[in-house]
Amino acid sequence: MSLRVVPELYCQNIEVNKKFFVEVLNFSVKYQRLDEQFLYLTKDGVDLMLEGIDGKSRKWLVAAAEFPFGRGVNFQWDVKDIDSLYWHVSKVAKDAIYLDLETKSYLCGDHNAVQKQFIVQTPDGYLFRFCEDVVD
């Protein structure tokens, strides 16, 4: 059995976020509970939960939720065909791009790993770094 991490992120407006994640980032809705302002999303085998801050479910907040949410953290998502995703995001939500597509080399132990990457900022200020390994 392998362990999985499924982040659950609070958001100010569940409908705005649903549209952003589905139409801009190409996530699919796995299931939703609209009465609780809750969405379970998936993309390339990675899952993510979104919950409206004003929803009627329990909340686990250690401080007031203020924009930008997710301060001090970014989420890395390994994707296939990063060029197509970047092109799509550039066309439909250019202002959401926080860091343009780049190729970056990182020292990993005794070798360099090379990735193409870009960062998108969600409507609530979370940073999503999309990456794809560059193979020589």
Image: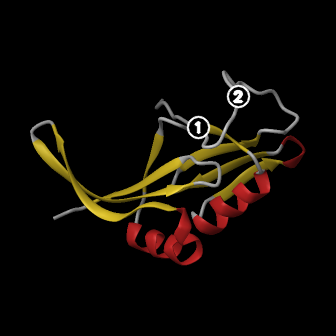
Q: Which residue sits at x=58%, y=70%?
A: 93
- Number of numbered discs present? 2
Which disc number belongs to residue 22? none
Distance CA(mark 2)–CA(mark 1)? 19 Å
Identify which amino acid the numbered label 1 is placed on.
Pro
Residue 81, visible in the rendered structure: no
The C terminus, quarter of image:
bottom left
Q: In which quarter of the image is residue 57?
A: top right
- Whether 89 is drawn above or below 27: the answer is below
Q: Where is residue 69 shown, x and y percent of the image? A: 61, 40
Q: Which residue sits at x=47%, y=37%?
A: 73
Which disc number belongs to residue 7? 1
- Whether 107 is drawn above or below 82: the answer is above
Tell me if mark 1 has few (under 14), some (14-19) or many (20+) residues whose alpha carbon lies within 10 angstroms of its own: few
- Furthest residue toward bottom: 91
Q: Where is residue 56 shown, x and y percent of the image? A: 88, 35
Residue 28, visible in the rendered structure: yes
Closer to the camera in the image, 19 or 135: 19
Tell me if mark 2 has few (under 14), some (14-19) or many (20+) residues whose alpha carbon lies within 10 angstroms of its own: few
SS at mark 1 in the image: loop
Closer to the camera in the image, 22 or 4: 22
Which disc number belongs to residue 64? 2
Closer to the camera in the image, 74 or 82: 74
Identify which amino acid the numbered label 2 is placed on.
Ala
